[in-house]
Amino acid sequence: TTHPDLKYHYIAHTSCDVIEERISTGPESADTYLGLLYAMEDLAVYGYLTNTRVKFVVVLSVPDAVIKNSDMKNIFRKIHTAYINQVCNPFYNIDGKKSIVSKRFVAAIDAIGKMTGEEVSSA
C-alpha cells in the first residue's frame, strides 16, 4: 500500500539527522568518513561528509557480511571523486534543488555499486 521508495526516503532523511547530530557534537576532524550511522533489519547505513558539507549516504543490504571501515572509506572516496568530476564540469548547473541527471555520473555510481556488491558477496 505504500510506495517502495518511501523506505529509502525515510532512510535518507534519518541519515541526514544522524550526520548532523554527529558533526554538531563531535570535534572537528580531518576524517570525513562517519562510519556506520545505523543498522535496520537487513540494511547497514554508512555516512560521509565532504569538506564542503556535502553528505553522502550508502545503504547496503548485508544480512551476514561484515564490511571493513577501510573498504567503506574506499567506496566513499570513489563516490566523492565521481561527484567532483560531475560538479567540475563547466556545463553542470549547480543547483541544490535539482537531482544530478548526468548519464556519466549515474554510470560511475552504478559501477561503484556493482563493484561494492561483488566485494560484499566475496567477503
Image (spheres, rainbow, N blue to C red):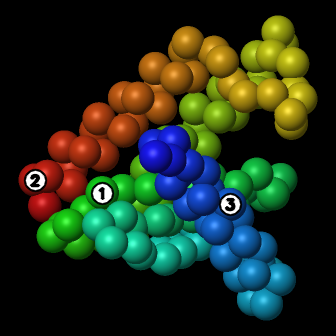
Q: Which residue is mark 2?
A: 122
Can residue 67 be seen in this snapshot? no
Q: How far across and how far down the image is residue 61, in percent?
A: 30, 57
Please state if 86 lies on the left or on the right of 6 as rendered: right
Residue 90 point in image, percent of width and height: 83, 13
Location of mark 3 (residue): 13
Q: Nearer the viewer, residue 3 or 31?
A: 3
Query: Which residue was labeled with disc 1?
Result: 61
Q: Residues within 10 Å of mark 2 (few under 14, many from 20)?
A: few
The reply to whether residue 104 is visible in this rendering is yes
Judge whether 17 appears above or below 115 on screen: below
Look at label 1 and name its amino acid: Ser
- The residue mark sitting in front, 2 or 1, is 1
Which residue is found at the position 70% from the left and 55% from the top? 55
Identify which residue is drawn at 25% across, 62% down.
62
Q: Residue at x 47, y 32 (%)?
A: 109
Q: Residue furthest left?
A: 122
Count of numbered circles in the view: 3
Separation of residues labelled 3 and 2 (CA atoms): 30 Å
119 sits to left or right of 49: left
Name the mark nearer the viewer: 3 or 2.
3
Q: Amino acid at mark 2?
A: Ser
**Precedes in sequence: disc 2 or disc 1:** 1
First-in-chain label (3 vs 2): 3
Distance in Å between CA atoms under marks 1 and 3: 18 Å
Residue type marked 3: His
